[in-house]
Amino acid sequence: LYACRLCNYREESDNPLIFRNIIKKEVKNALHTVPSAVSDDPTLPRSQNAICENCGHHEAVFFQSDTGQSDSLALIFVCCNCDHKWVQ
């Protein structure tokens, strides 16, 4: 049953679904667009606690993805040793 909060209008419904959120992009798909040289950028923040699963190095630069999804909170990390990229 759909019902208006402002007036007394009511309508029967066969489907109880009111809203569906469909995610169209994944941040992991954006990793191929990140250039490897981003690890040399001195303006990006660096983490000494990020462990690269490729080489075991502990330093990586990180930034938030700009894939057009303003609700995405995932961080992209790039290893400063081997330029391996991952999402956290």
Image (cartoon, rainbow, N blue to C red):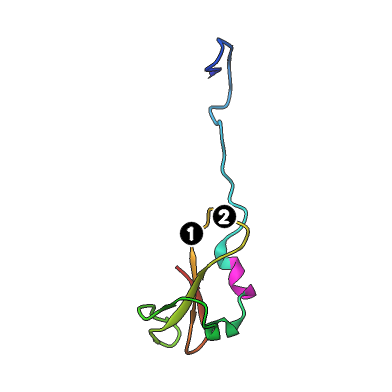
**Percent coordinates x, y for residue 5 in the rendering:** 52, 17
Residue situated in front as seen by the camera: 45 or 22: 45
Which residue is label 1 attached to? 73
Q: Could you tell me which secondary element the residue under label 1 belongs to?
A: loop
Q: Quadrant of the C terminus?
A: bottom left
Instruction: Report the number of discs.
Output: 2
Q: Residue at x 58, y 51 (%)?
A: 23
Q: Residue 16 in magenta?
A: no
Q: Residue at x 62, y 62 (%)?
A: 67
Q: Amino acid at mark 2?
A: Ser
Q: Could you tell me which secondary element the residue under label 2 belongs to?
A: loop
Q: Residue at x 55, y 10 (%)?
A: 8
- Dot 1: few (<14), some (14–19), or many (≥20) neighbours within 10 Å? few
Quarter location, residue 6 = top right
Over which residues does the magenta segment extend? 29-33
Q: Main secondary structure of the magenta part?
A: helix
Which residue is label 2 attached to? 70
Q: Amino acid at mark 1?
A: Leu
